Image: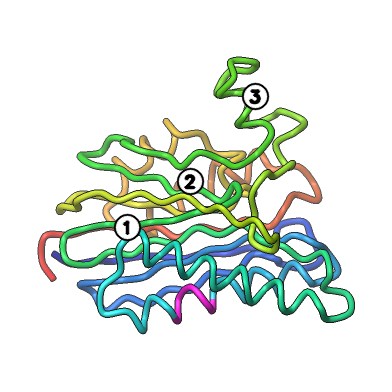
Amino acid sequence: MGLIYYAYTNRGGRENNEDSLQVQCDGTAGSFVLADGLGGHESGEVASRTAVDVILNGCAAAETLDEAGLLELFQDANGEILRRQAQPGQEEMRTTAVALRLDGGEAVWAYIGDSRLYRFADGELREVTKDHSVTYRKYLGGEISYMDIYHDDDRSRLLRVLGRENCRPETGRAAIAPGNAFLLCSDGFWEYVYNEEMQADLCKAETPERWVQLMLLRHIRRTPPGNDNFSLIAVFVEGEG
């Protein structure tokens, strides 16, 4: 099997882009990491960049990587952010993160916060990560509908992030096959493009870049002035490596 991908980030209506993303992919195996920094005054950028660097470097150094190994890399990233919080102006910096490893016919992922991973197979959405937010907890408790997640006032109140002593990321895994697709994105993107629209645009796209372009056309029509940074990584699994 082969892998092709497309990555995109935009500062939106903000002065600084506190999202970070990195990819390592040789066409047959790949590691993909995206983080959305919190804290303002550029410290969010430091937190997200630190998380991405630590996780991606750990993926590169590992011969194999299972769910436990990916969780350990998130803990390593958390420890490094906690150490850097000792620097003036960085005391409150934190970040979300989502990481995907594709290798040997298997996908392994981990995440914390409200940056998401979407998994598609046969043109259909099969899985979406569950946000670590007050809003998502309200949805799980039946207080609001799924569509209310996109507009609820508490959606930016995160219950789990990197940069706190108690770091509790979650993981997942799945077998992969040609025709599978993955999307990693920050909340500045998914808040304006709905799940069924991602699926519809995927069915029209022959490449990850085209898929991203179609979704961004929807995104740009809906974002208000001063909108948040937004980032995404799209990955296709193909038949030939």
Q: Quadrant of residue 41?
A: bottom right
Q: In which quarter of the image is residue 163?
A: bottom right
Going by the picture, which residue comes out furthest to the right?
Answer: 88
| 103 magenta-colored | no
CA distance for labels 3 and 2: 27 Å
User: What type of secondary structure mainly makes up the magenta span?
Assistant: helix
User: Residue, x 71% and y 57% (percent of image)?
Assistant: 12
Q: Which of 116 and 160 is in front in this view?
A: 160
User: Residue, x 71% and y 28% (percent of image)?
Assistant: 152
Residue position marked by numbered label 1 in the rendering: 108
Q: Position of residue 37 (x, y in %)?
A: 69, 63
User: In the figure, 44 relative to 211: above or below?
Assistant: below
Query: Tag 2 or tag 3, which sits nearer the N-term?
Result: 3
Q: Where is residue 197 in the image (x, y as percent from the top left)?
A: 44, 34
Residue position marked by numbered label 3 in the rendering: 138
Q: Where is residue 170 in the image (x, y as percent from the top left)?
A: 47, 50
Secondary structure of the residue carrying tag 1 is: strand
Looking at the picture, which amino acid does disc 1 mark? Val
Q: Which of 141 and 2 is in front in this view?
A: 141
Image: magenta residue range: 53-57
Task: Using a 10 Å C-alpha cutoff, classify the residue at mark 2 as few (fewer than 14 neighbours), some (14 to 19) or many (20 or more).
Answer: many
Secondary structure of the residue carrying tag 2 is: helix
Q: Position of residue 201 (x, y in %)?
A: 38, 41
Task: Using a 10 Å C-alpha cutoff, classify the residue at mark 1 as few (fewer than 14 neighbours), some (14 to 19) or many (20 or more).
Answer: many
* Pair 2/1: label in front: 1
Residue position marked by numbered label 2 in the rendering: 215
Going by the picture, which residue comes out furthest to the left?
Answer: 240
Looking at the picture, which amino acid does disc 3 mark? Lys
User: Residue, x 50% and y 58% (percent of image)?
Assistant: 98
